[in-house]
Amino acid sequence: MAKKDEQRLLNKRWMRAIMALIFLGIAYGFASLAIDSGSLLEYALAIFFFIWAIKCAIRAIRSN
């Protein structure tokens, strides 16, 4: 029963928007590290989290 409550919470618009902001913050952190160190892995992680944040933001906008 708790799993249904978690799924229902994750489908809320405001929760998806918060998740998008969190992923955007993580992407910013990895981008800052990548600029300082020049690591391609950190650049890749920054791009990955940025794309994930965009997807979450689009879902938040489209959800009911």
Image (cartoon, rainbow, N blue to C red):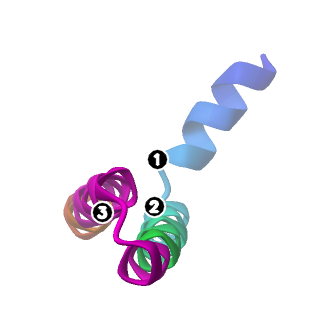
Marks 2 and 1: in contact by CB < 8 Å?
yes
User: Which of marks 2 and 1 precedes in the sequence?
Assistant: 1
Mark nearest the camera among 1 and 3 is 3
Which quarter of the image is occupied by the N terminus?
top right
Q: Is residue 5 above or below residue 52?
A: above
Q: Which mark is residue 40?
A: none
Instruction: Give SS at disc 3.
Output: helix
The residue at the point 35 percent across, 63 percent down is: 46
**52 inside magenta stretch:** yes
The residue tagged 1 is: 11
The residue tagged 2 is: 16
- The three-letter amino acid code for the residue at tag 1 is Asn
Q: Find residue 8 and report its horizontal and vertical position in percent.
A: 57, 39
Q: Nearer the viewer, residue 6 or 22?
A: 22
| In this picture, residue 57 sits left or right of residue 5 | left
The residue at the point 46 percent across, 47 percent down is: 11
The residue tagged 3 is: 43
Q: Find residue 52 and report its horizontal and vertical position in percent.
A: 31, 54
Dividing the picture into quadrants, the one containing residue 20 is bottom left
User: Which of marks 3 and 2 precedes in the sequence?
Assistant: 2
- The three-letter amino acid code for the residue at tag 3 is Tyr
The residues colored magenta run 31-55
